[in-house]
């Protein structure tokens, strides 16, 4: 296959791909804006960052807990029905939170649980469409790389747009923008041809029995467990940036570090997608993750502004490739009928790792310098990937070429 046929342009020109991908980005903007919008709104309404933090944490935990349940429901009932219902519930709960920002804490927590549990998994469902529309190999790797870059861009642009809107208009306006993004993104996404073809294993067209959970697939649990490690680095860096900035008495440094981290991650995803790496995906994960951990630990050991700038950039450069390799390995292991659930478990592992990394680093940085806290925080993901290594190394490769749904055969 020529270079042109494997280019990012060729991926986006694949039939119906752009029609699904662009709406998924709009939908994901909601996830990148709603948290900060709620913080602005609740702090203004209640005068307490503590209340805002509890509400955001509750929403996040409900989102993580419901991830596998939502994914399993989509695999069985299809994307159109489930994503439509989730988007309506999520948008309505965000609007309700905005209109009742002065309410008692129990009411706010109930609404935050609904908002978190109903959060539409745009990234997960889009990864299913990449697998359905693109053949295994270079094309699919580029598709997932574009997806990873899109995620980084939304989390770079979303908070900035939220802050500007909150300052120039009103915090409620930024939350309504978030609700609008999820409603519009979902409406456009579920009406795309690729999404409409994902009708679920319970549809009349599927006579075969429902496949067992991907967690029972040999080699899959090890990949899921291994993804906790890069997730922890992501969580550590989110808290380490303001901690390092505070230690260096340079508030602006926090934003610069996070921008470098996100930008380098996007660049790493594009670079990884443009390469044709022949190594087994599980072994790629075993190489990329330790490199990521070593760079992060070295950043903490050296310390100082220059080391932080270089270290955050190099860590970001390795993060997206590690995540992409993990998601590719998961897609290769999971049957197409449970692929949404498989990606949902991967998302859960990364999100759990991020929450754990933020909590561990936050606890350590109260008793140690940010650099030392970063080094100690890396011990847990190091142990995690070491435990997974033997299982990943002996994971058998699929014996047959992957079977695609009809969308993958008619491009």
Image (cartoon, helix red, strand yellow):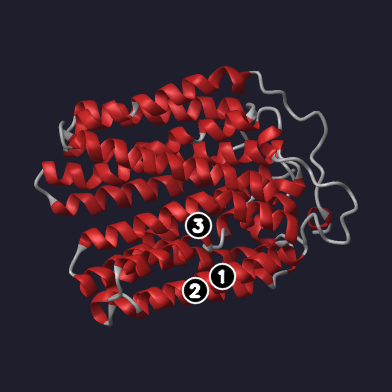
The local secondary structure at tag 3 comes to helix
- For image coordinates 45% across by 49% down, the residue present is 266
Residue that carries the numbered disc 1 in the rendered image: 87
**In the rendered view, would you say 126 is above or below 176?**
above
* Circle 2 or circle 3, nearest the eye: 2
Q: Quadrant of residue 86?
A: bottom right
Residue 112 seen by the camera: yes
In this rendering, position of residue 105 left or right of residue 327 = left
Judging depth in this view, the residue of 49 and 19 nearest the camera is: 49
State whether residue 236 appears in this view. no
Q: Is residue 307 above or below residue 383?
A: below
Q: N-terminal of the two: label 2 or label 3?
A: 2
For image coordinates 65% across by 18% down, the residue present is: 394
Residue at the outermost left position: 249
Contact? badges 1 and 2 (CB < 8 Å): yes
- Counting from the top left corner in percent of width and height, residue 255 is at 24, 54
Q: What residue is at 26 percent from the left and 47 percent from the top?
A: 257
**The C terminus is located in which quarter?**
bottom right
The first of marks 1 and 3 along the sequence is 1
Measure the C-alpha gap from mark 2 to mark 3: 22 Å
* Residue 59 percent location from the top left of the image: 41, 59
Residue 54 — which label?
none
Q: Is residue 272 or residue 230 the one in the foreground? A: 230
Q: Name the secondary structure under disc 2.
A: helix
Residue 40 figure quarter: bottom left
Give coordinates of residue 142: x percent, y percent. 61, 48
Q: Which residue is mark 2?
A: 91
Q: CA distance from mark 1 to mark 2?
A: 6 Å
Residue underneath mark 3: 150
Crowdedness of circle 3 by 10 Å Cα count: few (<14), some, many (20+)?
many
């Amino acid at each position: 296959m020529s270079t042109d046929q494997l280019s990012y342009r060729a991926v986006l020109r694949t039939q119906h791909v752009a029609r699904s991908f662009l709406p998924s980005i709009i939908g994901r903007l909601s996830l990148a804006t709603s948290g900060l919008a709620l913080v602005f709104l609740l702090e203004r309404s209640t005068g307490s960052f503590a209340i805002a933090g509890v509400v955001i944490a509750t929403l996040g935990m409900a989102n993580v807990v419901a991830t596998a349940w939502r994914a399993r429901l989509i695999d069985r009932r299809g994307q159109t029905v489930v994503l439509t219902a989730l988007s309506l519930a999520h948008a309505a709960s965000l609007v309700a939170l905005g209109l009742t920002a002065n309410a008692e804490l129990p009411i706010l927590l109930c609404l935050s649980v609904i908002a978190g549990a109903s959060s539409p998994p745009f990234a997960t469902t889009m990864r299913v469409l990449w697998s359905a529309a693109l053949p295994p190999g270079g094309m699919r790797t580029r598709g997932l790389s574009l997806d990873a870059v899109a995620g980084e861009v939304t989390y770079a642009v979303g908070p900035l747009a939220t802050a500007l809107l909150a300052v120039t208009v009103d915090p409620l306006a930024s939350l309504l923008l978030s609700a609008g993004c999820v409603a519009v993104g979902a409406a456009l996404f579920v009406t795309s041809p690729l999404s409409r073809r994902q009708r679920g294993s319970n549809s009349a067209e599927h006579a075969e029995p429902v496949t067992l959970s991907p967690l029972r697939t040999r080699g899959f649990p090890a990949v899921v467990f291994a993804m906790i490690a890069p997730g922890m680095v992501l969580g550590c860096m989110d808290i380490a940036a303001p901690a390092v900035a505070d230690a260096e008495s340079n508030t602006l440094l926090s934003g610069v570090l996070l921008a470098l981290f996100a930008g380098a991650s996007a660049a790493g995803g594009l670079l990884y997608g443009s390469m044709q790496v022949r190594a087994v995906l599980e072994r790629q994960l075993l190489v990329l993750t330790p490199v990521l951990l070593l760079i992060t630990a070295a950043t903490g050991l050296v310390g100082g502004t220059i080391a932080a700038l270089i270290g955050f950039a190099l860590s970001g450069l390795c993060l997206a490739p590690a995540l992409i390799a993990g998601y590719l390995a998961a897609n290769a292991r999971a049957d197409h009928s449970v692929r949404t659930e498989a990606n949902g478990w991967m998302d859960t592992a990364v999100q759990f790792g991020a929450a754990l990394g933020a909590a561990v680093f936050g606890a350590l940085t109260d008793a140690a310098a940010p650099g030392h806290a970063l080094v100690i925080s890396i011990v847990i993901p190091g142990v995690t990937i070491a435990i997974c290594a033997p299982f990943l190394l002996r994971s058998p490769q699929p014996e047959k070429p992957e079977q695609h749904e009809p969308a993958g055969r008619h491009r």
